[in-house]
Image (cartoon, grey):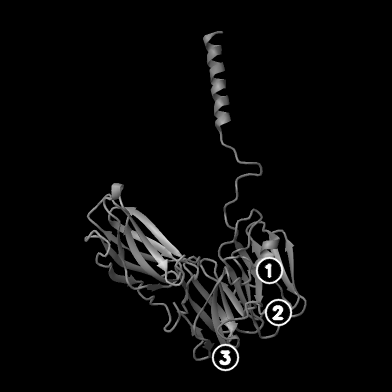
Amino acid sequence: MTAGRATIVAAVALLSAAGCAKSVFPPGGPIDKDAPRVIATTPADSSVSVPVGAGVEMLFSESMDHASVRDAIKVFPPPPHPNVDWSGRRLRLTWGEPLAENATYQVLLSGRARDAHGVPLGAAVAIRFSTGDSLAPGRISGVLRAKTLRRFGARVLIFPDSLGTRPDTTDFQPLYEAEADTIGAYSFAALGLETGYRVFAFFDRAGNGTYEEDQDVLAAWPTPIRLTPERAVADSINIVAVDPRAPAILSGNVVARDSTARYTVEARSEADSTVSRRVDRVGPGPFTLRVPEGKYFLRAIRQPGLEGKPPRAEVRRPEAIDVKAEEEMGGFTFDFGAGAEGAPPPTPNPTPTPPDPDRPPGSKE
């Protein structure tokens, strides 16, 4: 083989290798990770004098999963016999009967609606319109406060005050609905006046749209809200939500001279001694215990070493502590300075979580 021919063969081999190493998209093109968008609506948000025979149209940026959109769209108040039709990326809502005259309507598309590739919309879309010459002027807004519950996408529901402090969870039909954004903020606009409202935050952990008491969380603003012409706006309706199944956190320190001894810190239920939480550590230092809501006795044990040196020792906190779900209490100190059972009790200096400035007076923790 000549030198020139060898050079050509080598070049072809290099080009083939480079082609084999080239990354390619899977069949069907690149993976869709972009959230769909609503790029136009008819009528536009805040439209007035909408004909009573008009429907509602939404144009999406890409093809949508029709079933998920159907389940995610709601109209308040609900018109009779709604119907959903599709034409490509365009959705059209129509009704079996004309809309009411001089009435304000709200259309909510939940952020749970997905495109054809399963990517969710993310942020909810709301359209308010009136068949009269003006929108209802009422507004309610606030922020959901929660430590362990996911706020983004949480449903915020308005029920009539006549239902009392807890709506009928077997027939979840609110007057209005909204969804919280990434920081937990929510807002309602175009609400009717001279009506008493109750506002609830619904954390649908089961994800089925109905309230499951053993899984979901329903938190309420403690007092009814009445909007009037003189007070048409209620802001700072900040709802505090606590997950009753979330643990409380107890923290503190083990104080000792022996840096090699093994220590166990235990919280044991006052009501049921079989319920306990414990944490082990080597040598002195901090500890953290996560316990269900309830009353607990705390103790720390120095485990005996080889041949019983150092000997077993125990320090107890004499009084039970009462903790709520998500509560944080710190400052518990177990001092093994005396080095034997019956040493001085731990410093009872629990530091409870400071009160939330947004928690309304008189509301439950």
Q: Nearer the viewer, residue 19 or 241?
A: 241
Distance, label 1 to label 2, CA atoms, is: 14 Å
Left or right of 310 on screen, residue 86: right
Cα–Cα gap, marks 2 and 3: 26 Å
Pick the front one: 208 or 19: 208
Residue sitting nearer the eye, 62 or 245: 245
Return the residue at label 1. Answer: 57
In front here: 177 or 106? 177
Q: Residue furthest top?
A: 1
Task: Check disc 3 and report its element: helix, strand or loop.
Answer: loop
Give residue 270's position: percent from left, percent from top. Answer: 42, 71
Q: Secondary structure at mark 2?
A: loop
Report how far apart the C-alphas of labels 3 and 1 lie in the structure: 31 Å
Q: Quadrant of the C terminus?
A: bottom left
Residue that sits furthest to the front in the current view: 307
Q: Marks 2 and 3: which is nearer the front?
A: 3
Residue position for label 3: 194
Q: Nearer the viewer, mark 3 or mark 1?
A: 3
Question: What amino acid is labelled 3 in the image?
Answer: Glu
Badges 3 and 1: C-beta atoms under 8 Å apart? no
- 1 vs 2, front mark: 1
Indicate the position of residue 238 as horizontal and vertical percent values.
Answer: 46, 77
Q: Classify residue 231 as left or right of residue 89.
A: left
The local secondary structure at tag 1 comes to strand
**Residue 34 visible in image:** yes
